[in-house]
Amino acid sequence: MKIHEQHEARERESANVRERNSPEGPSAPALRAPALSRCTAAILAGGLGTRLRPVLADRPKVLAPVHQRPYLVHLLDWLAAAGIRETVLLTGYQADQVRRAVGDQHGSMKLVQSPEPRPLGTAGALKNGLGKLSSAVVLLLNGDSWCDVDLANFCEFHHLRCAALSIVLARVKDPARFGKVRTGPDGIVQRFEEKQSGAAGWINAGIYLIARSLIEEIPQGPVSLERDLLPDWLGQGKKVFGYRHAGTFLDIGTPASYREAEALIPRALPKMMSWRKDEA
């Protein structure tokens, strides 16, 4: 059995044990929803969507229409169904359009706007919104990708390892657009590899659980989470883990993948929303 298969098998067995020991039975794993409901989520929503300009016209990328609704709304549906109670939108280009499209409430979930004064990069936008992030651990998502990961399982993975940062990893056939992430035993990240063509591999899926204390360390100004900080944090010995998810991943940033999202999301979202756990 390969290392990543052993890792996934251990995770499944661990989850099965927790479910069997839950007083509510296997259909309601204990402790999952409370952990998620205590997390503030943040969505990187400032992208211009240059490659999607024919589709977007003058809209920001997160408002690209998918199945007759803005793509951002599908992400918000998913987060609300997972038990998230507050989401901060890290906006940039056409921030006012995002505010008008989604308002300050999505069902029972509160929405908070954090517009950047100028392009700050992924980490810079996160640091700019720090004052609006109220939890000790923040669930951070790229606003232009789709991954059908179970957020409750991901949250458990992060807390069981006392991680400073956990990253959802997706397996793709061609990692040339993304670069690979190498992990060791128990999911510890060993290195990030540059974008290059080659065999299938595990990539950063753009979903993170990150300690607020780590966000506080981000310098002011433009800075990239992926290019600048992740390699630096590894070099500093931070506890960075990769959570391998063998399900669906899609980056909607190209015309081809955007067309694929039109077919994928209507099928995938009902299943993902059915994972909701009872809140504390």
Image (tube, helix red, strand yellow):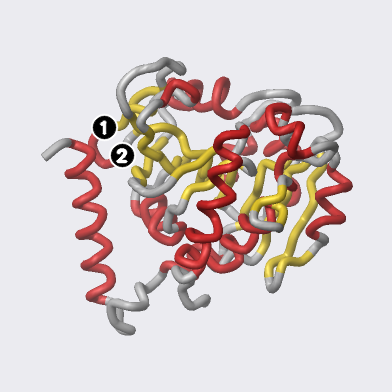
Observer-nearest residue: 239 or 268? 268
Q: Which residue is mark 2?
A: 187
The label shown at residue 184 is: 1
Label 2 residue SS: helix
Q: Which mark is residue 83?
A: none
The kind of residue tagged 1 is Gly
The residue that appears at 57% across and 61% down in the rendered structure is 78
The residue at the point 63 percent across, 25 percent down is 224
Q: Amino acid type of disc 2?
A: Gly
Circles 2 and 1, Cβ within 8 Å, touching? The answer is yes
Give percent across and percent down for residue 100: 87, 55
| Residue 1 position by quadrant | top left
Where residue 47 appears, as percent x and y from the top left, is 72, 34
Q: Is residue 280 above or below residue 94?
A: below
Few, some or many residues within 10 Å of mark 1 (<14, 14–19, 20+): some
156, above or below 279, in the image: above
Foreground residue among 188 and 2: 2
